[in-house]
Image (cartoon, rainbow, N blue to C red):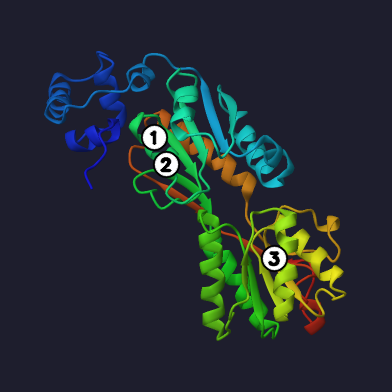
Amino acid sequence: MAARLNLEEIGRRAGVSRSTVSRVVNGEPNVSAKTKRRVEAVIAETGYRPHAAARSLASRQTGVIGLVIPSEAGTLFNDPYFGRLILGASDAMNGLDMTLALFVFGDEIDESAIISRVVNPGLVDGVIVTATRMADPLIDHLRDADMPFVVIGRPDNLSAVFSVDADNRGGARSAALHFAQLGRQRPALIAPPSNTSAGVDRRSGFLDGLAEAGLSIGGRIREGDWTEAAGRRAMAELLERRPDAVFVGSDRMAVGALQAIREADLRCPEDVAVVSFDGIIPADMVVPRLTSVAQPVQEVGERAVWLLKSVLDGQLTSAESVVFPTELVIRETCGAALVGGERDRAS
């Protein structure tokens, strides 16, 4: 596949940084004549035509970073994950002379519309994207627009971009190994959507851990859309297959899953152990207390802002991916206490 023509690619071919190409495009004087000729030669050779937002990038800074969340407003404000992510980004912005702007778009909005509403008018200097989908087309649109951006997540078209994520795969693997250590023999999985990077990584990580422990999942797999209702439906179906341990791919789905266990007159963790992922539900909000693989959502938001600021300042010119470790926080739903394990500890 041919490389996309943008400031980054022109800089790579000319052997200079993206910011240097931007200065040449904007006609700034602080570029040596030799470097300018080299960049202009590559531009002429490739036929590159800079986007309007790219031409104005160096000369007209807005002091605004955009946080783009592809979610319905109702879902956004009911999901504690996004609340923590926004809090982390806001905390980082407090240390900068810049403003954080939140852009919320429903899933039905075409990515080109996001570009036309956010990037083309020159509203922001850079963008942080919570890219949950695999092969997220918004990333390619941002590349084409020469807009500096950082991705939160791991879409499969993520090569040569700046990104921040949690170790979804490793965290899910730890849940599988924990079930094995507790002697559970019939594991099941309620996975997040398979068209999302977190869904793919958490599913594969859990299955990897089961294989490592010599356990088989059989057909005990269901998929949910992150919500409590989806977790409840999926667990009700799985209980017909009599699992003794279920890994639920998000805390919100786990809340619904626990409800389904109660409705089936079963006990958690005695009959069915549960481990979830996210670590965003306060421990005293769920009974029994939820064992979960915790990811540092707030820190992810903070790091995304600082990473983008470094890109805007020209301190980073080559792609960088930051992956935060996760932590299995053992409480009551996993059943560790039934076999002499400790409660409320990290593993």
Q: Image quarter for residue 228? A: bottom right
Q: Which mark is residue 172?
A: none
Q: Residue at x 53, y 22 (%)?
A: 64
Q: Residues within 10 Å of mark 2 (few under 14, many from 20)?
A: some
Identify the residue position indicated by label 3 in the image. Answer: 234
**Dot 2 corresponds to which residue?**
137
What type is the residue that disc 3 sits on? Ala
Mark 1–mark 2 Cα distance, whole angstroms, equals 6 Å
54 lies above or below 259: above
Examine the rendering and report whether any part of residue 237 can be seen: yes
Task: Residue at 69%, 42% (x, y): give it.
Answer: 75
The answer to whether residue 96 is above or below residue 30 is below
Q: Is residue 47 above or below residue 281?
A: above
- Say if mark 3 contacts mark 2, CB within 8 Å: no
Which residue is at a point 28% across and 23% down the rendered structure image? 50
Res 141 label: 1
